[in-house]
């Protein structure tokens, strides 16, 4: 009888302990033990409460003439190349920015062949809408020499001109990328922002701030914004990818089928 009362008392204590310590930590109903539930909930609680590190907002930094002079001097002292910033008499400044291309879709180029006769010119007039689409190599980067008055939209247009890309500039956007405490932040620049101001405020270290050109994702793809040749090229690319995917699947299943037949043959072979 005493043993039974002790077991009931102990059971009552365990249930009270479990419901008290796990309350507010997690809503798990099915667990192997209340102890596991407690530690799981506590670990999750600590992760949720982890301090969030906010990126530095370089846009809001307003620089006086003296601040600009000092930052230009500090910037030039940190670089190991001739890509210096120069302060002008009108209080503006010029310098270089490096933009990394992170595009997932192909870009369009004009026809490369030039007409050498009037007859070919007439033929090309009928083919004026034909464009060449291709993927830019991974991690393509370009340096641009700009001024403190150059806006993000002008930077995008200049980059497309450098690569003779004929796509609408509105399809692309410039992003600010920064790293802090092993966390990566990405922010889309507005059309009127001045990238060289960001570069000067952040300094030359690209881990602190780098500029990335990406597709201007606004939700679902607006296929009406693409020309007929572009859409046709997209269909060709999709068809090639689909055919390659089908080939890989057929090959994998054929290999599995052959191994099964070999296994069956080894089982049915006498001796």
Image: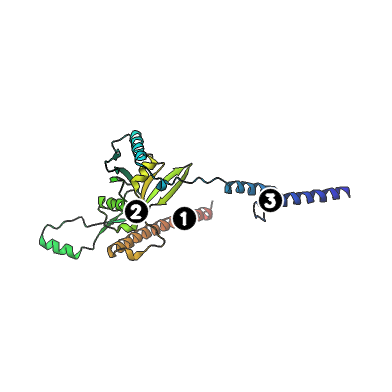
User: Circle 2 sits on which residue?
Assistant: 192
Mark 3 or mark 2, whichever is nearer to me: 2
Q: Dot 1: few (<14), some (14–19), or many (≥20) neighbours within 10 Å? A: few
Numbered tag placed on residue 256 in the rendering: 1
Q: How many marks?
A: 3
Measured as percent of width and height from the top left, residue 168 is found at 30, 59
Residue 56's x, y, as percent? 45, 45
On screen, residue 55 above or below 244: above
x then y, percent, for residue 7: 82, 49
Mark 3 or mark 1: name the one nearer the start of the chain. Answer: 3
- Judged by depth in the image, the label closer to the viewer, 3 or 1, is 3
Q: Is residue 33 visible?
A: no
First reached walking from the N terminus: tag 3 or tag 2: 3
Q: Quadrant of residue 206?
A: top left
Secondary-structure class at tag 3: helix
Label 2 residue SS: loop
Residue depicted at x 47% and y 55% = 256
Cβ–Cβ below 8 Å for labels 3 and 1? no
Residue pointed to by mark 3? 22
Looking at the picture, how far across and down is residue 2, in whole percent? Answer: 88, 48
């Amino acid at each position: 009888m005493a043993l039974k009362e002790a077991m009931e008392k102990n059971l009552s204590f365990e249930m009270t302990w479990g419901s008290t310590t796990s309350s507010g930590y997690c809503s798990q109903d099915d667990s192997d033990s209340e102890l596991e539930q407690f530690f799981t909930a506590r670990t999750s609680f600590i992760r949720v409460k982890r301090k969030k590190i906010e990126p530095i907002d370089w846009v809001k930094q307003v620089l006086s003439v003296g601040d600009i002079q000092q930052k230009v001097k500090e910037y030039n002292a940190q670089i190991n190349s001739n890509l210096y910033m120069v302060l002008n008499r009108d209080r503006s400044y010029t310098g270089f920015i490096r933009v990394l291309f992170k595009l997932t879709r192909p870009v369009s180029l004009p026809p490369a062949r030039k007409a050498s006769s009037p007859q070919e010119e007439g033929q090309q007039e009928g083919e004026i809408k034909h464009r060449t689409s291709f993927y830019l190599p991974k991690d393509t980067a370009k340096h641009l020499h700009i001024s403190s008055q150059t806006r993000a939209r002008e930077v995008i247009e200049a980059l497309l001109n450098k690569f003779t890309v004929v796509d609408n500039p509105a399809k692309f956007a410039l992003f600010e990328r920064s790293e802090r405490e092993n966390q990566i932040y990405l922010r889309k620049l507005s059309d009127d922002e001045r990238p060289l101001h960001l570069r000067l405020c952040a300094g030359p270290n690209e881990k602190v701030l780098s500029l990335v050109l990406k597709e201007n994702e606004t939700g679902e793809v607006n296929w009406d914004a693409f020309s007929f040749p572009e859409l046709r090229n997209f269909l060709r690319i999709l068809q090639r990818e689909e055919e390659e995917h089908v080939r890989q699947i057929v090959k994998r299943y054929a290999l599995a089928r052959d191994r099964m037949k070999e296994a069956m043959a080894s089982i049915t072979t006498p001796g």
